[in-house]
Amino acid sequence: MIEEEERADRSDPFDTHPSLKQRLASLEGAFAKASPMAQADAPAASLLPDLETHAAAAARAAWARQTVETLKPLEWSAIGEAVYVPQWRAMAKHFHKWLSAFTPETLPSSKDALIRAGGSLANPGEEGITDEERLGRA
C-alpha cells in the first residue's frame, strides 16, 4: 500500500497536502540546499495554483452558492465606498429620529451618558435592559 502511494500522483484541488509522491520529490534536494520558499517573501497565497478559483470555492463552502454568485469582485481600495458607506447610510437612515436629538456638541461622551442614550433605543415592551445592553446600543 505504501509503495503504491509513493508511485501514485493523485491529488484533488481540495486536498490539504500534495500527493505523497510530490512531497517525497520535494524532499529529495531539501538537505542539499535551503528551500527557495524558505527565503521567499511571497505570501502563502502564492502557493495556490489558481487563487481566484480556490477563494471562490471557499466562499461557496462558507455561504450559500446563490449568495456567492451574486457578489461582484472589488479591489480592496474600493471596499470603503462600495460596502461601508452604504451600510453607514442605511444605519443613519434607520436611526435618523434618534440621531436627530444630537449635535456634535451634545453627543454622549461619558459612559453614563451613553447608557442613558442607549436606553432610549429600547423596543416597545422591552423591559429589564441592562446597562451593558444600553451601552452597546448607543
Image (cartoon, grey):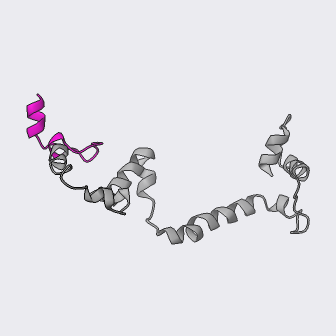
* Picture residue at 88% right of the left edge, 68% below the top: 103
Query: Which corner quadrant of the image does residue 127 belong to?
Result: top right
| Location of residue 132 in the rendering, given as x and y in whole percent from the top left corner | 81, 41
Q: Nearer the viewer, residue 53 or 33?
A: 33
Specify start and end residues of the magenta stretch as a single range. Answer: 1-22
Apparent side of residue 82 relative to residue 91 in the rendered image (left or right): left
Q: Nearer the viewer, residue 71 or 130?
A: 130
User: Which quadrant of the rendered structure holds the N terminus?
Assistant: top left
Most extreme residue toward the top, as rendered? 1
Q: Nearer the viewer, residue 137 or 11?
A: 11
Q: Is residue 19 magenta?
A: yes
| Location of residue 50 in the rendering, given as x and y in whole percent from the top left corner | 28, 59
| Location of residue 2 in the rendering, given as x and y in whole percent from the top left corner | 12, 30
The image shows residue 79, relative to residue 137, as above or below, that is below
Apparent side of residue 76 relative to residue 123 in the rendered image (left or right): left
Query: Which corner quadrant of the image does residue 133 belong to?
Result: top right
| Location of residue 115 in the rendering, given as x and y in whole percent from the top left corner | 87, 48
Report the number of discs: 0
